[in-house]
Amino acid sequence: MKKTSIFLLTTFLLSACSPTVKLQAPEKPIEINLNVKIEQHVKISIDKDVKQAISTNKDIF
């Protein structure tokens, strides 16, 4: 009987101290600053014979 009452009392005390989790939206909006600098370098190399064909036939392109 004594063991049962101790078990029930312990169970009651442990259940009373159960942690709670609260999800709450922030008061201020989340601000993300992205300072990004994008540079692009394009290098086109043409073979000599192709360059010569383009210069002689300007109507190709």
Image: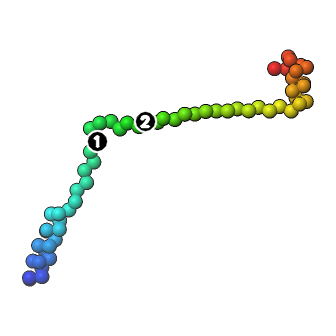
Res. 18 image quadrant: bottom left
Q: Is residue 25 above or below residue 58?
A: below
Res. 13 image quadrant: bottom left
Q: Which of marks 2 and 1 is in front?
A: 2
> So how many labels did they put on this image?
2
Q: Mark 1 highlights which residue?
A: 25
Q: Looking at the image, do the residues carrying marks 2 and 1 touch, with CB atoms under 8 Å apart? A: no
The residue shown at (48%, 35%) is 35
The residue shown at (22%, 56%) is 20
Report the amino acid beneath label 1: Ala
- Looking at this view, is 61 or 33 the one in front? 33
Rendered location of residue 15, percent (x, y):
17, 65
Answer few, some or many: residues within 10 Å of disc 2's Cα (few below 14, many 20 plus, some between 14 and 19).
Answer: few
- Residue furthest to the top in view is 59
Q: Mark 2 highlights which residue?
A: 33
Res. 40 image quadrant: top right
Asked whether, in this view, residue 7 is left or right of residue 22, the answer is left
What secondary structure is found at the residue carrying circle 1? Answer: loop
Q: In this view, does 25 lie above or below 48?
A: below
Asked whether, in this view, residue 26 is left or right of residue 9, the answer is right
The residue shown at (81%, 20%) is 61
Rendered location of residue 28, percent (x, y):
29, 36
Q: Is residue 40 above or below residue 16?
A: above
Report the amino acid beneath label 2: Asn
Asked whether, in this view, residue 21 is left or right of residue 36, the answer is left
Answer few, some or many: residues within 10 Å of disc 1's Cα (few below 14, many 20 plus, some between 14 and 19).
Answer: few
The residue shown at (25%, 50%) is 22
Asked whether, in this view, residue 5 is left or right of residue 30, the answer is left
- Looking at this view, is 29 or 19 the one in front? 29
